[in-house]
Amino acid sequence: RVGTHVSVSYLERVIAAVLERIESVEKFDEFSYFFEPVHLDQEAANKLAACLKDSAVRNALTVMTDRIRAADPQSASAPLVDELIKAVAEEHGLRVAKLFMPLRLALSGKRAGVSVPLLLSTLGTEESAKRIEGALFCQ
């Protein structure tokens, strides 16, 4: 999204998502993943690869991608996304925590940041699905 036009509503969603985490405008660059393709440093890439060695996690993320794409983009709120993550984790016999790190890394390239449900709902369904697929197919 860098160098491209972003809507005012998208900017408002990003600002609302990060507002509690920034003390100054200079800190806003820590959230560049809302506007740029995901970049994983070596440590993050290794962590993602380790998470994706678990076939249940890979399968769950594949299902997540399908369900995210099927979701109504207008109603994909953070609470709804949180419920979706919980449901997919349960269906695959996983603790929710087992999905949060690979999702966070796939969506942002960072090991910390806004909550995963908020991150996914802010990015939107299509962008989130693309990023998760990218992480799955790059491993």
Image (cartoon, helix red, strand yellow):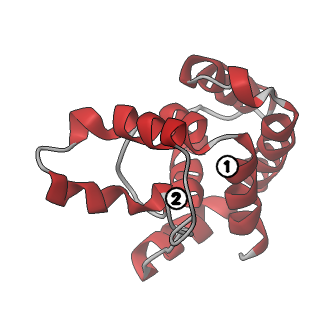
User: In the image, what residue occupies the spot 74% across and 31% down?
Assistant: 73
Kindly give the residue lying farthest to the left in the view shown.
23
Vertical placement of 124 versus 128: above or below?
Answer: above
Q: Is residue 112 left or right of residue 132?
A: left
Number of numbered discs = 2
Residue 64 rendering spot, x and y as whole percentages: 77, 40
Query: Disc 2 designates what residue?
Result: 105
Vertical placement of 20 versus 49: above or below?
Answer: above
Query: Disc 1 designates what residue?
Result: 128
Can residue 53 be seen in this snapshot?
A: no
At numbered mark 1, what does the secondary structure look like: helix, strand or loop?
A: helix
Residue 124 rendering spot, x and y as whole percentages: 65, 41
In the image shown, does 5 or 131 lie closer to the viewer?
A: 5
Which amino acid lies under the numbered mark 2 shown in the image of this protein?
Leu
Q: Earlier in the sequence, mark 1 or mark 2?
A: 2
Find residue 38 and report its image quarter: bottom right
Q: Residues within 10 Å of mark 2 (few under 14, many from 20)?
A: many
At numbered mark 2, what does the secondary structure look like: helix, strand or loop?
A: helix
User: In the image, what residue occupies the spot 46% across and 60% down?
Assistant: 33
Q: Is residue 132 left or right of residue 112?
A: right
Find residue 111 and report its image quarter: bottom left
**Rounded to the nearest whole Å, what is the CA distance between mark 1 and mark 2?**
11 Å
Q: Is residue 12 left or right of residue 45?
A: left
In the image shown, does 91 or 30 lie closer to the viewer?
A: 30
Vertical placement of 4 versus 102: above or below?
Answer: below
Which amino acid lies under the numbered mark 1 shown in the image of this protein?
Ser
Find residue 15 and report its image quarter: top left
Can residue 99 be seen in this snapshot?
A: yes
Q: Residues within 10 Å of mark 1 (few under 14, many from 20)?
A: many
Quadrant location of the C terminus?
bottom right
